[in-house]
Amino acid sequence: MKPDQIILVCAQGWFQLAEGRCRELQPWADVKGSALVVVEFAQSQVGVQSCKGKAEYAAAIIEKAVRAEGAVDGPLQVFVHRQIRHNDSSSVLYTAIPLDLWQQFQTWSQQQPDHCLIVPLAGLFLGKAADDQLQVLHLGSQLHAFSAAGGKMHYAGATAIGSDPADLHAPLRTVVMQLKASGWTGAPKGLRWGAVLSDDLDVERGLLGKLAEAGLNDARLMPHEAFRIGDVACATVLPHLLDAMDAQAIQAPWLGRMAWLSERYVVPLAALIAVMTVGLGAFAFFSSHLIEQERTALQALRGEAEQLRQRVSQVDRANTAALDPAAATFVRQLGFAAVHDPIQMLATVRQAARPGVRVQRVQLIKTDSQARPRFRVDGVVDGPANQELRRFLAELLAQGWQAESVSPNDGSSGAFAYLLKPVVPGKSI
């Protein structure tokens, strides 16, 4: 589905591209119709980072590294645009921006009457057939270059001091030097150049000639679409990049991306849903007796579980001195897990976390040989620590779990750890 309009947000201002016209907008103005909003975030950092460990922790690792460098002040929002996984690490193309700026964009987009989805500029490097190319985007005084080849990713960026075309020659050489310094050895499919917003494509072609002088051959312009700003002609590569982009480039909740894509594929999806409906109806007809059998088996299992709880409770209250110490310890741990279902505990913690609290792990542990087993939860607070933690702990208490603070294993800002114990009316276990 093509949007009714493209909104470009950059250092030069806010621009609306629609119906062959380019109009300047007031920042945070309301927009009518669906829109894809391409943003070159101010005070941001774009780069490629190698992250050790599990790929799921890449955003947290990058956040910690960017905060240590001091390139972006305050709490951060990290967008993982693309991730290439290796045996014990992963390479990540990311954008890191101030969290309050991202929250401002989210609030504005949600207030619009139609789809209004945010696409960070670096997310446009994920288009179809982007691999094995060097892609360079020119926007104002900024140059952004990205290449993915041989299982590796490379990014370089530079800023011109002036606004004349000649002022871009030095940043262009800087970008090439940065790429080569990062280990980039060339692009088998050549170089593709795109102007995000340009009033003269001949200037862009002249810059391609400078790349040839730097030894980068097979440099060509991407397809550009013409627009008019008043009586002045301009061109942009954005329609071409947005048409070819991966859905992962859109920074929106999963449901919002699916709603956007569903409008593009509404007819095929309708046919697929019809086929699935018929199939599910047939499946339900022939499997009703199986459902009844499973229900009977479930009731039997519940009865056995209740008997197990009663037996474990009796053993726990009885004199366990006659038991072997190792057997007694095992019985007590089994009793806690039988009475307080770990699976149910995971659901309770997940419900209490909500946006703003990232739970890293939930464990059933013993702090020492004399203590009873306890659930331990470790996590990180994304937002204001006091407010988010108070809400998180209040939710747990409402579900019958009292939290005792312990030292977290993670030394990053906002990290926390608690031992959880069930609260019984009139008695704490």
Image (spheres, grey):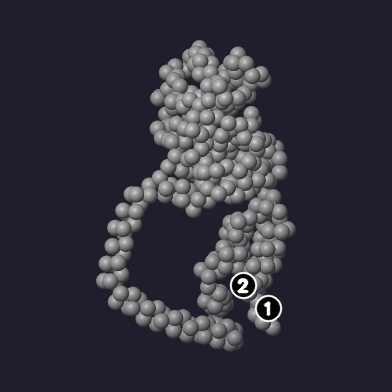
Sequence order check: which comes first, mark 2 or mark 1?
2
Viewer-nearest residue: 127 or 408: 127
Q: Nearer the viewer, residue 81 or 92?
A: 81
Residue 151 placement (x, y as % from top left) = 44, 35
Q: Which quadrant: the N terminus?
A: top left
Quarter holding the C terminus is bottom right
In this rendering, the label closer to the viewer, 2 or 1: 2
Residue displayed at 60% across by 56% down: 355
Can you identify the residue that label 1 sits on? 428
Which amino acid is tagged 2?
Gln
Residue to which mark 2 is pinned: 399
Q: Residue at x 55, y 84 (%)?
A: 313
260 to 318, vertically: above or below: above
Q: Secondary structure at mark 2?
A: loop
Which residue is found at the position 68% from the left and 63% from the top? 391
- How crowded is the residue under tag 1: few (<14 C-alpha within 10 Å), some, or many (20+)? few
Looking at the image, residue 237 lies above or below residue 83:
above
Residue 121: give x, y in percent of width and height: 55, 35
Q: Nearer the viewer, residue 241 or 135?
A: 241
Quote the CA–CA distance across marks 2 and 1: 14 Å
Q: Secondary structure at mark 1?
A: strand
